[in-house]
Image: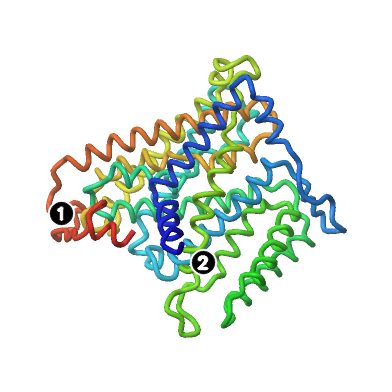
Amino acid sequence: MKRARRRTRSWITRETTGGALLIGAAVIALVWANSPWREGYQALSETVIGPAYLGTWHVHLDLPLTAWAADGLLAIFFFVVGLELKHEFVAGSLRSPQQAGVPMLAAVGGMALPAAIYVAFLLGLGDRAALHGWAIPTATDIAFALAVLAVFGKGLPVAIRTFLLTLAVVDDLLAIIVIAIFYTSEIHWLALGAAVVGVGVFAWLVRRRRNLWYVLLPVALVTWALMHASGIHATIAGVLLGFVVPATVIWGEDDTRVHRMEFDLRPVSSGLALPIFAFFAAGVSLSEGGGLSEVLGQPVVLAIAAALILGKLVGVLGTTWLLTRITPLRLPDGLGVRDLLPVGFLAGIGFTVSLLIAELSFAHGSEHTAGAKAAVLGASVLAAVLGAITLRWDARTARSADMNLDGVADEVLVRIGDEKDREEH
């Protein structure tokens, strides 16, 4: 039984499996939402469950399933992101500014340029009503991007994965800040203050000698509910709770609590939370509002597609090229600027977070909602295809002895897909 559970967990947490589950859920939703049975999909999405108004805290938890997927299940994913961030800042690639400088600044460039392209396209095409969605093309889907890299990046130095992971983690952190600042219409300060207290209580409990899940879980759920009631997107609670978990060994334990919690929750995040969110978020009915041609003809579609594919590519590549030319910062051993061509395309896979921001940007049923989601889905798939093609080209092209041009011969001991890499992942 234990062996079967280990095998199941190993299968679910593979990068390739996570990407396949995301794509499969999105395809099922898209087909169902555009089939003769589309009303069933709409009815399921709009099914309301949960308790109604609770006391004076503005807590409304009688939500449709789409909201539970975006606000509730996605909080699990963001909790895991919070754990990853904590690990990276304490013991990972973000602990050293010099080591993380290039991918961190590349992430900033890879968010700023897509936002600028989106705004420029809409102003040029005269659709000012969709400007509120400027953050839609700034996100990168970690799970989807790493899945493509795992399949098509075999033979390349593992430094590419580290660079992409660092870029995507910083991208997620900035996207979380954007959601908290720009996509919060009204703040209920009493509920927000109570949520902050909840985070503090969780931080205290998670540092005690004994970690009892049946104590931590209710505190986390109450904190999530209070964050939801505050008006700030509830997934922010997941990030904050994950970030307060200790990332160093305490109480003489063999492993960090960040790593143990991530180990326990990643299967739930990859195998349940993300696919269900994708199922409810990707069900775009292209037959409404004049059909496929009218939906795809919206200026917002062209703006998102150009921003995700061209904006991300030029933002990541351009920022990295400038940094390595005019500053002392250099890429890691074995990694050259040419390797960032596929990384730039993979960064254009917006998917999960982009779909979330699309829902926050436009009101339910808005004329822009279907177009924005269709653009995110189409551009993410195209970015994945271009990333896969350029990864194979990169892997088959001869490499120099000093790819990062730091004047020292590269020492590349591990490559994606080899035996040592499989042991570590």
Residue most toward the front? Answer: 1
- The kind of residue tagged 1 is Asp
In front of the other: 333 or 18: 18
Measured as percent of width and height from the top left, residue 312 is found at: 41, 39
Left/right of residue 238 with respect to residue 227 in the rendered view: left
Residue corresponding to mark 1: 402
Q: Which residue: 58% across, 80% down?
A: 210
Q: Earlier in the sequence, mark 2 or mark 1?
A: 2
Q: Which residue: 60% across, 59% down?
A: 238
Residue corresponding to mark 2: 261
Q: Which residue: 55% across, 53% down?
A: 77
SS for callout 1 = loop
- The kind of residue tagged 2 is Met
In front of the other: 106 or 242: 242
Label 2 packing within 10 angstroms: few (<14), some (14-19), many (20+) = some
Q: Which residue: 45% across, 64% down?
A: 2
In front of the other: 152 or 178: 152
Seen in the picture, residue 101 relative to 336 is either above or below; the reply is below
Mark 2 or 1: the one toward you? 2
Measured as percent of width and height from the top left, residue 417 is found at: 26, 51
Distance (Cα) linking label 2 and label 1:
39 Å
SS for callout 2 = helix
